[in-house]
Image: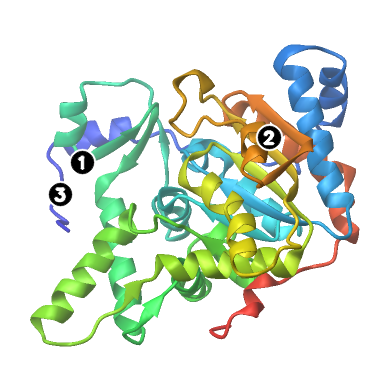
Amino acid sequence: MNDQSPINDTRKAELLSTVVEHVDITSFDARPIVDAMKKMSFTSRDLGRATDIYNQMLADKDCSIVLVIAGSTSAGGCMDLYAELVRNNMVDAIVATGASIVDMDFFEGLGHKHYQAKEIPDDDTLRSLYIDRIYDTYIDEVALQNVDHTIFEIAETLPAKAYSSRAFIREMGRYLTQNGAKDNSLVKLAFEHDVPIFCPAFTDSSAGFGLVKHQVDAMKAGKPYLTIDSIADFRELTDIKIKAGTTGLLMIGGGVPKNFVQDTVVCAEILGHDDCEVHKYAVQITVADVRDGACSSSTLQEAASWGKVSTALEQMVYAEATSVMPLLASDAYHRGHWKTREKRSFAKMFADD
Protein backbone atom coordinates (compact mmCIF):
# COMPACT_ATOMS: atom_id res chain seq x y z
CA MET A 1 0.00 0.00 0.00
CA ASN A 2 2.25 2.71 -1.34
CA ASP A 3 1.05 6.31 -1.36
CA GLN A 4 4.03 7.42 -3.40
CA SER A 5 3.11 10.20 -5.86
CA PRO A 6 3.25 9.13 -9.51
CA ILE A 7 5.72 10.65 -11.92
CA ASN A 8 4.49 13.24 -14.44
CA ASP A 9 1.50 14.62 -12.55
CA THR A 10 0.58 16.86 -15.50
CA ARG A 11 0.14 13.91 -17.84
CA LYS A 12 -1.83 12.03 -15.19
CA ALA A 13 -4.17 14.98 -14.64
CA GLU A 14 -4.71 15.20 -18.39
CA LEU A 15 -5.75 11.55 -18.61
CA LEU A 16 -7.95 11.79 -15.50
CA SER A 17 -9.90 14.86 -16.58
CA THR A 18 -13.30 13.51 -17.72
CA VAL A 19 -15.38 11.99 -14.94
CA VAL A 20 -17.77 9.13 -15.73
CA GLU A 21 -21.29 10.46 -15.15
CA HIS A 22 -23.65 7.76 -13.91
CA VAL A 23 -27.01 7.47 -15.65
CA ASP A 24 -30.04 8.79 -13.76
CA ILE A 25 -33.01 6.52 -14.51
CA THR A 26 -35.42 8.98 -12.88
CA SER A 27 -34.54 11.76 -15.33
CA PHE A 28 -36.05 10.12 -18.43
CA ASP A 29 -39.00 7.84 -19.15
CA ALA A 30 -37.97 4.79 -21.18
CA ARG A 31 -41.46 3.30 -21.39
CA PRO A 32 -42.21 4.53 -24.94
CA ILE A 33 -38.97 3.16 -26.41
CA VAL A 34 -39.28 -0.16 -24.54
CA ASP A 35 -42.87 -0.50 -25.74
CA ALA A 36 -41.68 0.14 -29.30
CA MET A 37 -38.84 -2.38 -28.93
CA LYS A 38 -41.33 -5.07 -27.88
CA LYS A 39 -42.78 -4.89 -31.41
CA MET A 40 -39.37 -5.43 -33.01
CA SER A 41 -37.25 -8.58 -33.18
CA PHE A 42 -33.80 -9.80 -32.11
CA THR A 43 -32.34 -8.25 -28.94
CA SER A 44 -34.92 -5.46 -28.88
CA ARG A 45 -37.78 -7.89 -28.39
CA ASP A 46 -35.72 -9.84 -25.83
CA LEU A 47 -35.19 -6.65 -23.84
CA GLY A 48 -38.88 -5.86 -24.03
CA ARG A 49 -39.80 -9.26 -22.62
CA ALA A 50 -37.08 -9.03 -19.95
CA THR A 51 -38.48 -5.66 -18.88
CA ASP A 52 -41.98 -7.16 -18.70
CA ILE A 53 -40.67 -9.95 -16.49
CA TYR A 54 -38.94 -7.51 -14.14
CA ASN A 55 -42.15 -5.50 -13.90
CA GLN A 56 -44.01 -8.72 -13.08
CA MET A 57 -41.53 -9.34 -10.26
CA LEU A 58 -42.25 -5.88 -8.87
CA ALA A 59 -46.00 -6.31 -9.21
CA ASP A 60 -46.04 -9.77 -7.59
CA LYS A 61 -46.72 -9.06 -3.91
CA ASP A 62 -45.16 -12.40 -2.94
CA CYS A 63 -41.95 -11.99 -4.95
CA SER A 64 -38.64 -11.01 -3.38
CA ILE A 65 -36.08 -9.72 -5.89
CA VAL A 66 -32.34 -10.39 -5.90
CA LEU A 67 -30.09 -8.09 -7.93
CA VAL A 68 -27.03 -9.96 -9.21
CA ILE A 69 -24.07 -7.94 -10.53
CA ALA A 70 -20.91 -9.16 -12.21
CA GLY A 71 -18.57 -7.22 -14.46
CA SER A 72 -17.71 -3.52 -14.47
CA THR A 73 -21.03 -1.82 -15.20
CA SER A 74 -20.80 0.13 -11.94
CA ALA A 75 -17.58 1.78 -13.10
CA GLY A 76 -19.07 2.23 -16.57
CA GLY A 77 -21.98 4.44 -15.52
CA CYS A 78 -24.64 2.22 -13.87
CA MET A 79 -23.67 2.93 -10.27
CA ASP A 80 -26.50 5.37 -9.55
CA LEU A 81 -28.92 3.07 -11.39
CA TYR A 82 -28.29 0.27 -8.90
CA ALA A 83 -28.50 2.74 -6.03
CA GLU A 84 -31.95 3.89 -7.22
CA LEU A 85 -33.18 0.28 -7.25
CA VAL A 86 -32.29 0.05 -3.55
CA ARG A 87 -33.57 3.53 -2.70
CA ASN A 88 -36.97 2.78 -4.25
CA ASN A 89 -37.50 -0.74 -2.88
CA MET A 90 -37.03 -2.36 -6.29
CA VAL A 91 -34.62 -5.05 -5.02
CA ASP A 92 -34.50 -6.90 -1.70
CA ALA A 93 -31.00 -8.45 -1.68
CA ILE A 94 -27.83 -8.15 -3.74
CA VAL A 95 -25.21 -10.68 -4.81
CA ALA A 96 -22.20 -9.18 -6.56
CA THR A 97 -18.52 -9.39 -7.27
CA GLY A 98 -16.17 -7.77 -4.79
CA ALA A 99 -14.97 -5.40 -7.50
CA SER A 100 -18.50 -4.03 -8.08
CA ILE A 101 -19.08 -3.41 -4.39
CA VAL A 102 -15.63 -2.46 -3.10
CA ASP A 103 -13.44 -1.19 -5.96
CA MET A 104 -16.29 0.68 -7.63
CA ASP A 105 -19.18 1.63 -5.32
CA PHE A 106 -17.37 1.89 -1.96
CA PHE A 107 -14.53 3.59 -3.85
CA GLU A 108 -16.86 6.36 -5.03
CA GLY A 109 -18.59 6.39 -1.65
CA LEU A 110 -15.28 7.59 -0.23
CA GLY A 111 -15.26 10.47 -2.71
CA HIS A 112 -13.18 9.05 -5.56
CA LYS A 113 -14.17 8.99 -9.23
CA HIS A 114 -13.97 6.90 -12.38
CA TYR A 115 -12.82 8.58 -15.57
CA GLN A 116 -13.54 8.22 -19.26
CA ALA A 117 -10.46 7.41 -21.31
CA LYS A 118 -10.08 9.96 -24.09
CA GLU A 119 -7.27 7.82 -25.40
CA ILE A 120 -5.74 4.49 -24.47
CA PRO A 121 -1.96 4.92 -24.31
CA ASP A 122 0.36 2.00 -23.77
CA ASP A 123 -0.64 0.21 -20.56
CA ASP A 124 2.94 0.34 -19.32
CA THR A 125 2.62 4.12 -19.52
CA LEU A 126 -0.56 3.97 -17.49
CA ARG A 127 1.22 1.84 -14.92
CA SER A 128 4.01 4.41 -14.63
CA LEU A 129 1.35 7.03 -13.88
CA TYR A 130 -0.48 4.85 -11.33
CA ILE A 131 -3.58 4.66 -13.52
CA ASP A 132 -5.57 1.41 -13.67
CA ARG A 133 -7.68 0.68 -16.77
CA ILE A 134 -11.04 -1.08 -17.16
CA TYR A 135 -11.57 -1.16 -20.95
CA ASP A 136 -12.11 2.56 -21.70
CA THR A 137 -12.40 3.65 -18.05
CA TYR A 138 -9.60 4.83 -15.78
CA ILE A 139 -9.10 4.59 -12.01
CA ASP A 140 -6.46 6.42 -9.99
CA GLU A 141 -4.43 3.67 -8.31
CA VAL A 142 -3.46 6.00 -5.47
CA ALA A 143 -7.16 6.57 -4.76
CA LEU A 144 -7.80 2.83 -4.96
CA GLN A 145 -5.12 2.27 -2.35
CA ASN A 146 -7.15 4.53 -0.07
CA VAL A 147 -9.87 1.87 -0.28
CA ASP A 148 -7.35 -0.77 0.80
CA HIS A 149 -6.40 1.38 3.79
CA THR A 150 -10.02 2.07 4.70
CA ILE A 151 -10.96 -1.61 4.64
CA PHE A 152 -7.96 -2.24 6.92
CA GLU A 153 -9.14 0.51 9.28
CA ILE A 154 -12.68 -0.93 9.44
CA ALA A 155 -11.30 -4.41 10.15
CA GLU A 156 -9.15 -3.03 12.95
CA THR A 157 -12.24 -1.68 14.74
CA LEU A 158 -14.19 -4.96 14.70
CA PRO A 159 -14.06 -7.91 17.09
CA ALA A 160 -11.76 -10.69 15.89
CA LYS A 161 -14.18 -13.35 14.66
CA ALA A 162 -15.61 -14.82 11.46
CA TYR A 163 -17.86 -12.57 9.37
CA SER A 164 -19.92 -13.33 6.31
CA SER A 165 -19.23 -10.90 3.50
CA ARG A 166 -22.73 -9.53 4.17
CA ALA A 167 -21.84 -8.70 7.77
CA PHE A 168 -18.58 -7.00 6.81
CA ILE A 169 -20.17 -5.04 3.94
CA ARG A 170 -22.80 -3.86 6.39
CA GLU A 171 -19.97 -2.38 8.46
CA MET A 172 -18.69 -0.68 5.31
CA GLY A 173 -22.14 0.85 4.87
CA ARG A 174 -22.14 1.98 8.48
CA TYR A 175 -18.74 3.59 7.90
CA LEU A 176 -20.07 5.52 4.88
CA THR A 177 -23.01 6.89 6.87
CA GLN A 178 -20.46 8.55 9.14
CA ASN A 179 -17.54 9.22 6.82
CA GLY A 180 -18.82 8.94 3.27
CA ALA A 181 -18.70 11.58 0.56
CA LYS A 182 -21.60 10.40 -1.64
CA ASP A 183 -25.26 10.00 -0.73
CA ASN A 184 -26.04 7.76 -3.71
CA SER A 185 -23.74 4.90 -2.73
CA LEU A 186 -25.18 1.41 -3.11
CA VAL A 187 -23.29 0.18 -0.03
CA LYS A 188 -24.52 3.11 2.07
CA LEU A 189 -28.13 2.89 0.86
CA ALA A 190 -28.20 -0.88 1.38
CA PHE A 191 -27.17 -0.31 5.00
CA GLU A 192 -29.84 2.33 5.48
CA HIS A 193 -32.60 0.25 3.84
CA ASP A 194 -31.66 -3.12 5.37
CA VAL A 195 -30.84 -4.68 1.98
CA PRO A 196 -28.14 -7.34 2.48
CA ILE A 197 -25.23 -7.46 0.03
CA PHE A 198 -23.30 -10.70 -0.52
CA CYS A 199 -19.95 -11.00 -2.29
CA PRO A 200 -19.13 -14.72 -2.45
CA ALA A 201 -15.60 -13.92 -3.69
CA PHE A 202 -15.20 -10.89 -1.42
CA THR A 203 -11.44 -10.93 -1.11
CA ASP A 204 -11.09 -10.83 -4.91
CA SER A 205 -11.16 -7.03 -4.61
CA SER A 206 -9.49 -4.18 -2.75
CA ALA A 207 -11.04 -5.65 0.38
CA GLY A 208 -8.60 -8.52 0.04
CA PHE A 209 -5.55 -6.29 0.35
CA GLY A 210 -6.86 -4.51 3.43
CA LEU A 211 -7.91 -7.74 5.13
CA VAL A 212 -4.60 -9.45 4.39
CA LYS A 213 -2.78 -6.52 5.98
CA HIS A 214 -5.12 -6.75 8.98
CA GLN A 215 -4.34 -10.45 9.42
CA VAL A 216 -0.60 -10.13 8.88
CA ASP A 217 -0.27 -7.24 11.33
CA ALA A 218 -2.31 -9.17 13.92
CA MET A 219 -0.23 -12.32 13.45
CA LYS A 220 2.99 -10.35 13.92
CA ALA A 221 1.59 -8.87 17.11
CA GLY A 222 0.35 -12.24 18.33
CA LYS A 223 -3.25 -11.03 18.33
CA PRO A 224 -6.44 -12.64 16.98
CA TYR A 225 -7.87 -11.40 13.68
CA LEU A 226 -11.13 -11.48 11.78
CA THR A 227 -11.85 -13.77 8.83
CA ILE A 228 -14.45 -13.87 6.06
CA ASP A 229 -16.64 -16.97 6.23
CA SER A 230 -17.82 -17.92 2.72
CA ILE A 231 -19.88 -20.81 4.12
CA ALA A 232 -21.82 -18.31 6.23
CA ASP A 233 -22.49 -16.38 3.01
CA PHE A 234 -24.08 -19.43 1.45
CA ARG A 235 -26.05 -20.27 4.59
CA GLU A 236 -27.36 -16.75 5.06
CA LEU A 237 -28.40 -16.31 1.44
CA THR A 238 -30.12 -19.70 1.56
CA ASP A 239 -31.94 -18.60 4.72
CA ILE A 240 -33.20 -15.58 2.79
CA LYS A 241 -34.38 -17.80 -0.05
CA ILE A 242 -36.23 -20.09 2.37
CA LYS A 243 -37.93 -17.16 4.09
CA ALA A 244 -38.70 -15.34 0.82
CA GLY A 245 -40.47 -18.21 -0.91
CA THR A 246 -41.21 -16.71 -4.33
CA THR A 247 -38.13 -15.07 -5.81
CA GLY A 248 -37.00 -13.29 -8.95
CA LEU A 249 -33.46 -12.72 -10.22
CA LEU A 250 -32.28 -9.64 -12.11
CA MET A 251 -28.80 -10.63 -13.24
CA ILE A 252 -26.19 -8.50 -14.96
CA GLY A 253 -23.38 -10.71 -16.21
CA GLY A 254 -22.74 -14.17 -14.81
CA GLY A 255 -19.85 -15.72 -12.98
CA VAL A 256 -19.80 -16.65 -9.31
CA PRO A 257 -22.66 -14.33 -8.22
CA LYS A 258 -25.06 -15.90 -10.73
CA ASN A 259 -24.34 -19.49 -9.74
CA PHE A 260 -24.21 -18.62 -6.05
CA VAL A 261 -27.73 -17.21 -5.94
CA GLN A 262 -29.17 -19.96 -8.11
CA ASP A 263 -27.65 -22.65 -5.87
CA THR A 264 -29.70 -21.51 -2.88
CA VAL A 265 -32.61 -23.60 -4.15
CA VAL A 266 -30.50 -26.77 -4.11
CA CYS A 267 -29.00 -25.88 -0.73
CA ALA A 268 -32.47 -25.38 0.75
CA GLU A 269 -33.47 -28.84 -0.44
CA ILE A 270 -30.36 -30.35 1.14
CA LEU A 271 -31.36 -28.68 4.42
CA GLY A 272 -34.70 -30.47 4.27
CA HIS A 273 -36.84 -27.76 2.67
CA ASP A 274 -38.17 -29.90 -0.15
CA ASP A 275 -40.95 -27.40 -0.74
CA CYS A 276 -38.51 -24.58 -1.60
CA GLU A 277 -39.57 -23.03 -4.90
CA VAL A 278 -37.22 -22.66 -7.81
CA HIS A 279 -36.60 -19.03 -8.74
CA LYS A 280 -39.91 -18.12 -10.41
CA TYR A 281 -38.59 -15.19 -12.44
CA ALA A 282 -35.16 -14.71 -13.98
CA VAL A 283 -33.59 -12.18 -16.33
CA GLN A 284 -29.95 -12.28 -17.37
CA ILE A 285 -28.15 -9.64 -19.41
CA THR A 286 -24.87 -10.93 -20.79
CA VAL A 287 -22.62 -11.12 -23.83
CA ALA A 288 -21.24 -14.54 -22.85
CA ASP A 289 -21.41 -17.11 -25.63
CA VAL A 290 -22.85 -20.52 -24.78
CA ARG A 291 -20.77 -22.34 -27.38
CA ASP A 292 -17.69 -22.74 -25.19
CA GLY A 293 -19.71 -24.69 -22.61
CA ALA A 294 -18.26 -22.74 -19.72
CA CYS A 295 -17.13 -19.19 -18.88
CA SER A 296 -20.37 -18.47 -17.02
CA SER A 297 -22.29 -18.71 -20.25
CA SER A 298 -24.91 -21.29 -19.28
CA THR A 299 -28.44 -20.18 -20.12
CA LEU A 300 -31.30 -19.85 -17.68
CA GLN A 301 -32.99 -22.80 -19.37
CA GLU A 302 -29.88 -24.88 -18.62
CA ALA A 303 -30.22 -23.83 -14.97
CA ALA A 304 -33.72 -25.34 -15.02
CA SER A 305 -32.18 -28.77 -15.52
CA TRP A 306 -30.44 -28.31 -12.16
CA GLY A 307 -33.69 -27.42 -10.44
CA LYS A 308 -32.76 -23.77 -9.91
CA VAL A 309 -34.91 -21.66 -12.24
CA SER A 310 -38.36 -21.93 -13.81
CA THR A 311 -38.46 -21.85 -17.61
CA ALA A 312 -41.85 -20.15 -17.70
CA LEU A 313 -40.73 -16.62 -16.85
CA GLU A 314 -37.09 -16.32 -17.86
CA GLN A 315 -35.32 -14.24 -20.48
CA MET A 316 -31.75 -14.04 -21.70
CA VAL A 317 -30.73 -10.69 -23.21
CA TYR A 318 -27.52 -10.86 -25.20
CA ALA A 319 -26.31 -7.28 -24.93
CA GLU A 320 -23.66 -5.18 -23.25
CA ALA A 321 -25.40 -4.24 -20.02
CA THR A 322 -24.70 -0.49 -19.91
CA SER A 323 -26.59 -0.15 -23.22
CA VAL A 324 -29.81 -1.83 -22.02
CA MET A 325 -30.00 -1.66 -18.21
CA PRO A 326 -30.85 2.08 -18.23
CA LEU A 327 -33.85 1.31 -20.46
CA LEU A 328 -35.06 -1.63 -18.37
CA ALA A 329 -34.60 0.16 -15.05
CA SER A 330 -36.12 3.46 -16.21
CA ASP A 331 -39.15 1.63 -17.62
CA ALA A 332 -39.69 -0.20 -14.32
CA TYR A 333 -39.14 2.96 -12.27
CA HIS A 334 -41.74 4.94 -14.25
CA ARG A 335 -44.32 2.11 -14.34
CA GLY A 336 -44.23 2.43 -10.58
CA HIS A 337 -45.03 -1.06 -9.29
CA TRP A 338 -42.40 -0.44 -6.60
CA LYS A 339 -44.62 2.16 -4.95
CA THR A 340 -46.89 -0.50 -3.44
CA ARG A 341 -44.28 -3.19 -2.70
CA GLU A 342 -43.80 -4.45 0.83
CA LYS A 343 -40.33 -3.75 2.18
CA ARG A 344 -38.57 -7.02 3.09
CA SER A 345 -35.66 -5.67 5.20
CA PHE A 346 -33.87 -9.03 4.97
CA ALA A 347 -30.79 -7.65 6.73
CA LYS A 348 -32.78 -7.69 9.98
CA MET A 349 -32.84 -11.49 9.86
CA PHE A 350 -29.32 -11.66 11.22
CA ALA A 351 -28.07 -11.27 14.77
CA ASP A 352 -25.59 -8.50 13.98
CA ASP A 353 -28.39 -6.17 12.85
Gap in Å between the C-alphas at discs 3 and 1?
Answer: 8 Å
x 76%, y 57%: residue: 88
User: As shown in the figure, which amino acid type bears the numbered disc 2?
Assistant: Pro
- Residue 347 falls left or right of residue 169: right
Residue 140 drawn at (x, y percent): 30, 44
Callout 2 environment at 10 Å: few (<14), some (14 to 19), or many (20+)?
many
Gap in Å between the C-alphas at discs 3 and 2?
Answer: 37 Å
Callout 3 environment at 10 Å: few (<14), some (14 to 19), or many (20+)?
few
Mark 2 lies on residue: 326
**Residue projecting furthest to the top:** 41
- Residue 167 falls left or right of residue 281: left
Q: Which mark is residue 5?
A: 3
Mark 1 lies on residue: 130
Seen from the viewer's position, the closer of residues 313 and 28 is: 313
Task: Give the number of the mark in front: 3 or 2.
Answer: 2
Residue 228 drawn at (x, y percent): 36, 70
Q: Quick one: SS at disc 2?
A: helix
Give the quadrant of residue 218. Answer: bottom left
Q: Quick one: SS at disc 3?
A: loop
